């Protein structure tokens, strides 16, 4: 029997714009699928179509094999969390979380609110107003409010994007843990690769309304299905087996395959190949050293520190494979 969410050949149009162009994917119960793609790639539109907020021009959205087309938004039993949690400003945190719990008794509501505050790490915050919360706390409350009525799935649209980078990383870890511990079925929209890899069991890469690949993060990084996917994942250089071997790589490629050099794929090593260093710059995590590969392409080598005298760096390749060539 088919279980969970099924999207088949979904098409959403705004006038002449095809925002979602024939996307099919399944979300198994208790798993999280990330929708990752650049701005305007159709992520939010697909999420809204799943929620029933945008009509499909073609295809279907089903739950447990039942077509949801005739089911109204509020009857679909999906929870939603947006970039700005949209808490009711005049209600306390507790009343916000209890909002969808009208079918329970007052005592049951109180217990559920306390349980949800515990889950999102904010026990004792029930009497506060949304204005008395930090951005991160407000998003946790929004999550608690969406989870409280036990929706069959949660649809999250860039829920962390209004937060600063450090908080974002921490909350992404928390969110991943909460979704797993509560066995929540979820679709998670983001344009942040790291966030998608942290939170989602499988990640769908959307570009211009089309789904280019759906895989777990490890497979996406190791074997992007095309140059477009690899480029979106950060590859700037695509090298042949010959060049890869000059860099010390020992694998083999089949005809037509090239290696996509993803961020972090090349590292400084004493016994690596010699390459010309063209520039160096700091990132939050490490130093990025711009180098010229033997075939003249520019690539970036990650290093914990700057090279003091960089006449020739050396790079040990761990480049990732792109299955398709041009
Ligand atoms: N209400 C609308 N009316 C007309 N066109 C729209 C509307 N909403 C989105 N679009 C268009 O549909 C396409 C997909 O937009 P969508 O918001 O789904 O992308 P996205 O991947 O979520 O982008 P972002 O990451 O910037 O939020 C874009 O070309 C956008 O301009």
Image (cartoon, helix red, strand yellow):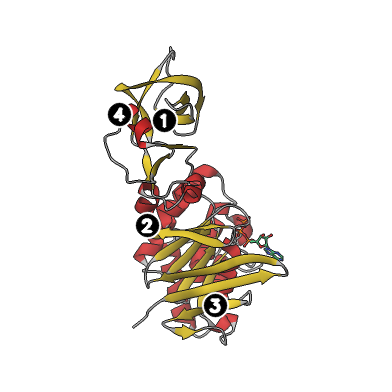
Q: Earlier in the sequence, mark 2 or mark 1?
A: 2
The mark closer to the camera, 4 or 2, is 4
| Residue 271 x, y percent position in the rendering | 28, 21
Q: Which mark is residue 216?
A: 2
Please say if 223 is above or below 263: below
Separation of marks 1 and 3 at Cα, in angstroms = 44 Å
Q: Position of residue 213 (x, y in %)?
A: 45, 58
Q: Quadrant of residue 82?
A: bottom right
Mark 3 sits on what residue? 59
Can you see residue 140? no
Q: Are marks 4 and 1 in contact (CB under 8 Å)?
A: no
Q: Earlier in the sequence, mark 4 or mark 1?
A: 4
Q: Secondary structure at mark 3?
A: strand
Mark 1, mark 3: which one is toward the viewer? 3
How busy is the neighbourhood of tag 4: few (under 14 within 10 Å), some, or many (20 plus)? Answer: some
Q: Is residue 208 visible?
A: yes
Q: Image point 45% across, 19% down: which residue?
A: 276
Give the CA distance from mark 2 to mark 1.
24 Å
């Amino acid at each position: 029997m088919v279980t969970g969410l099924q999207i088949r050949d979904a098409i959403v149009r705004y006038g002449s714009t095809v925002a979602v162009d024939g996307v099919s994917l399944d979300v198994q119960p208790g798993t999280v699928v990330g929708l990752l793609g650049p701005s305007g790639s159709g992520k939010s539109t697909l999420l809204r179509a799943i929620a029933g907020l945008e009509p499909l021009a073609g295809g279907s959205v089903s739950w447990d094999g039942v077509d949801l087309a005739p089911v109204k938004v509020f009857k679909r039993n999906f929870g939603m969390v947006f970039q700005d949690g949209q808490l009711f400003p005049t209600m306390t945190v507790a009343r916000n979380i209890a909002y969808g719990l009208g079918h329970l008794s007052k005592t049951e509501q109180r217990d559920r609110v306390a349980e949800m505050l515990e889950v999102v790490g904010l026990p004792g915050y029930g009497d506060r107003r949304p204005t008395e919360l930090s951005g991160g706390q407000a998003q946790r409350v929004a999550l608690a409010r969406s989870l409280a009525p036990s929706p069959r799935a949660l649809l999250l649209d860039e829920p962390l994007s209004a937060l600063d980078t450090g908080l974002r990383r921490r909350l992404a870890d928390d969110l991943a843990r909460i979704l797993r511990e509560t066995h929540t079925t979820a679709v998670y929209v983001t344009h942040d690769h790291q966030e998608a890899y942290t939170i989602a069991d499988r990640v769908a890469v959307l570009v211009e309304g089309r789904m280019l690949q759906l895989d777990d993060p490890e497979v996406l990084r190791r074997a992007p299905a095309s140059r477009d996917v690899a480029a979106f994942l950060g590859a700037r250089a695509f090298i042949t087996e010959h060049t890869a071997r000059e860099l010390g790589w020992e694998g083999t490629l089949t005809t037509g395959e090239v290696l996509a050099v993803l961020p972090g794929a090349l590292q400084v090593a004493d016994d690596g190949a010699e390459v010309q260093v063209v520039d160096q710059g700091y990132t939050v995590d490490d130093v990025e050293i711009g180098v010229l590969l033997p075939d003249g392409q520019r690539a970036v080598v990650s290093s914990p520190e700057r090279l003091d005298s960089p006449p020739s760096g050396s790079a040990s390749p761990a480049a990732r494979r792109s299955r398709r060539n041009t």
